[in-house]
Amino acid sequence: MEKGEKRPTYTKEFRERAVQLSVDSDQTLEVVAADLGVSLGTLSRWRRRQGVSTPRGAVQALRESRAENEELKKRNRQLEKEKKLAEMEREIFKRCGGLLREGTGRRFQFIQAEKDEFPVVLMCRCLEVSVSGYYEWAGREPS
């Protein structure tokens, strides 16, 4: 603030609503203060005067909680991918019947028939054949 510049004045109602917003909001005090166009120190002073204080470590605990929440979301996405993969593997095994007892030619035929439904790499892994072997077989001319 420049010398001689008058400080802004805020009504009692504005201060009370600002404090209430800072209590109810999921945002940090810094963000709430910036949204309201007041300094962090001003908002903190209003909170103290109204008997609303931030417990020591609450801001750090909130940050840790948010970080933990993000980690859990990331882990959940990973588990969802793994679940989808396991479901596809189960479906492949259900459809292939006793193909694991058959030769590789029959396995390759199954992969050829189901390649629009499942990833080739996944089917090759489930049926214990190499991906390159499948593509080599698929590129051959019929005998």
Image: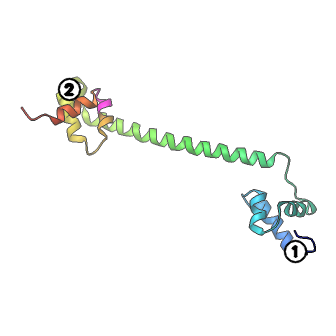
Which amino acid type is marked by label 1?
Answer: Pro
Say which quarter of the image contains residue 121. Answer: top left
- According to the picture, the residue beneath numbered tag 2 turns out to be 104
Q: Is residue 98 visible?
A: no
> Is disc 1 placed on a helix, strand or loop?
loop
Real-space Cα separation, disc 2 to disc 1, in angstroms: 82 Å
Instruction: Mark 2: give few (<14), some (14-19) or many (20+) Cα within 10 Å.
Output: some
- Could you tell whether 133 is left or right of 26 in the image? left
Quadrant housing the N terminus: bottom right
- Would residue 64 be counted in the magenta stretch? no
Residue 45 lies in quadrant: bottom right
Magenta range = 124-128
Which residue is found at the position 79% from the left and 63% from the top? 33
Q: Amino acid at mark 2?
A: Thr
Q: x, y percentage for residue 82?
A: 45, 38
- Disc 2 or 1, which lies upstream in sequence? 1
Q: Is residue 73 left or right of residue 32?
A: left
Query: What residue lies at 85% left-to-right and 49% top-to-bottom?
Result: 55
- Residue 111 appears in view: yes
For label 2, the SS is helix
Identify the residue at horizontal 36%, vertical 39% (top origin): 88
Colouring convention used in this rendered image of the protein: rainbow
Please say if 131 is above or below 10: above
Q: Report the magenta stretch's main SS.
A: helix
Compared with residue 26, is residue 106 higher up or lower down, i.e. above or below? Answer: above
Give percent across and percent down for residue 116.
26, 45
Q: Which mark is residue 8?
A: 1
